Amino acid sequence: MSIFSFDEEIGKLTVNGSCAVIDSEDDGFEQENSGVLWHKNLLSENPRSEIGSSHLAAPSSSPLNIVNGRRRSSVYDKMSVVTPPNTRRLMLPSNEANSDNSSFCSPSTLKKHGLRVLEDFRPIRVLGRGAYGKVLLVKDSHTSRLYAMKQLKKAEILIHEESDTSPNKEEALEKRLERTFAERTILSELEHPNIVKLFYTFHDHHKLYLVLQFIPGGELFYHLKEQGVLDEDTVTFYAAEISSALKFLHSKGIVYRDLKPENCLLDERGHLVLTDFGLSKKSAKNSNTATDNLLNPGEAVDTLYSIIGTPEYCAPEILEGKPYTQNCDWYSLGCLVYDMLTGKPPYTGVNHKVILNKIMKDKTPKIPTYFSEGMKDFLGSLLKKDVTKRWDVDRLWNTDGPKPKKKKAGQAKTTSFQSHFVFRKIDWAKLETGEVQKCTTGPILPIITNWELAENFDTEFTEMRLDSETENNCINIQRLIRPGDAQVFQGFSYVASTSYLERHF
Ligand SMILES: Nc1ncnc2c1ncn2[C@@H]1O[C@H](COP(=O)(O)OP(=O)(O)OP(=O)(O)O)[C@@H](O)[C@H]1O
């Protein structure tokens, strides 16, 4: 199905491609005054901001970082970026193409065309917050089903830092737009038991909305904070579920690029679900082909160049600004496994340069001597800074043919990732068909007495008032969005197929 079909259909119904502007009462749940973006509040309340005012001035592109304990936000384009040769450019509209900012339609028009609108959902509480907006627990007013609604503020995506005088402003904007569409486009094409499901997307004057499956067990980050460290069996179970999701993504030509505990959620049975595909990248090679047109086993997706991700979990080749492939995700898996076992990733630092220096100084990461021999071997193979010596897991992956022999602990060479000693208790065949996820429980069973309470999410979010934005230091959105800017979000709206919706409810 064409990913841009809905808005394009509606576009045809309008005169000169313009639709009615949504009334001010159709704004988001937050009861913001129409057209107002609350900057000071966004900054002071953002729990991920540790940092000084220069970072705070630009939430959309800042390396927002830890404040409470270990929480880290992803880094976008703050660091220098070499333009990827295969980046698909979004066409920015010319000013005369649309001079009234009205690339979206009224709720009644959207409804008529089977699209969802904000008023279909009742907000219940805040689940989390990221660089561009909040994630809310919402209830469908028609069906009473619960969803996680990710809201992205258009102005945050469109505006530039006033201090940014670089000639590449337009290019940076294109990249932000591309990433915004990437999450919606990539998720709408995927179905895997360890990847969050996307049901609907739509947009109004101020925001873009992604209506996702609500994963009630909270972030792995939250459970790590509660438990400190996890035992090897628990960690290898999660590593197997993440690997299955990563291998699936790579086979579709997608690099995830943002593996970290904050993006790993636990479902009601304690199985791991990857969320936040805002930094994922689909290979240009097969972006115009059917989604089931797989790359050959082990074939690399296009080489990428953007420095992106969360530095503590980033592969050295990304931090160095070198070209990289999907193999970067396997290095990040090594960092995450190390983090779950020890309480922190192998290299930490205030920015990517500090982390890179530490990686370069070290011959190999310091793997604690108390780890089992199998785990030392596993981590040593994933955390190789030289990508040519690192495990090429996509090539080593093996579920076909006879069951591979399990390797002994400490055996460095393995012919199959799945047959490594650390995975000796994993039933890969059942994991990959989704039977494990459907019929068994994971090692940590989240306590859920009432799904609407979102008990496994940080109270700093769940106790946040839904209308917490205050009127201080507001910036009028109309001054920030230039005529024609809003047009760039055309094509964002989406409804999953009926069979997909039925399969997951
Ligand atoms: N489907 C979901 N179910 C439950 N909670 C969710 C879901 N999606 C996101 N969240 C919560 O909201 C938080 C922020 O979501 P997400 O990481 O997608 O936002 P983001 O803006 O991309 O963040 P970042 O700036 O860190 O990249 C998550 O860490 C999680 O706690």
Image (cartoon, grey):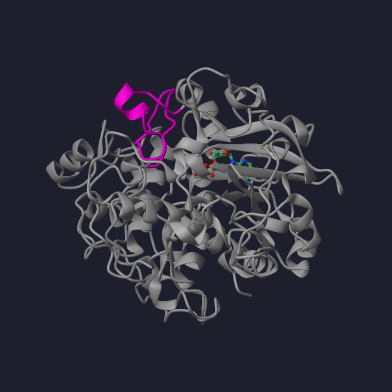
Horizontal and vertical percent position of residue 412? 29, 61
Is 379 left or right of 386, judged from the image as shown?
Answer: right
The verdict on residue 62 being magenta is yes
- Residue range in magenta is 48-74
Horizontal and vertical percent position of residue 37? 53, 31
Where does the N terminus fall, quadrant-wise? bottom right
469, above or below 13, in the image = above
Residue at (61% x, 45% y) in the render:
205
Which residue extends farthest left? 361
Residue at (20% x, 47% y) in the render:
364
Horizontal and vertical percent position of residue 323? 23, 62
Residue at (72% x, 57% y) in the render:
438
The verdict on residue 133 being magenta is no
Q: Main secondary structure of the magenta part?
A: loop
Q: Nearer the viewer, residue 64 or 344?
A: 64
User: Where on the picture, by quarter, is residue 23?
Assistant: top right
Where does the C terminus fall, quadrant-wise? bottom right
**Quarter for ligand 1?**
top right
355, above or below 54, in the image = below
Residue at (51% x, 46% y) in the render:
233
Is 121 left or right of 247, judged from the image as shown?
Answer: right
> How many labels sit on residues?
0
Is 112 left or right of 193, judged from the image as shown?
Answer: right
Q: Is residue 409 visible?
A: no
Q: Is residue 368 visible?
A: yes
Q: Nearer the viewer, residue 265 or 415?
A: 265
Horizontal and vertical percent position of residue 360? 14, 45
Which residue extends farthest top? 472
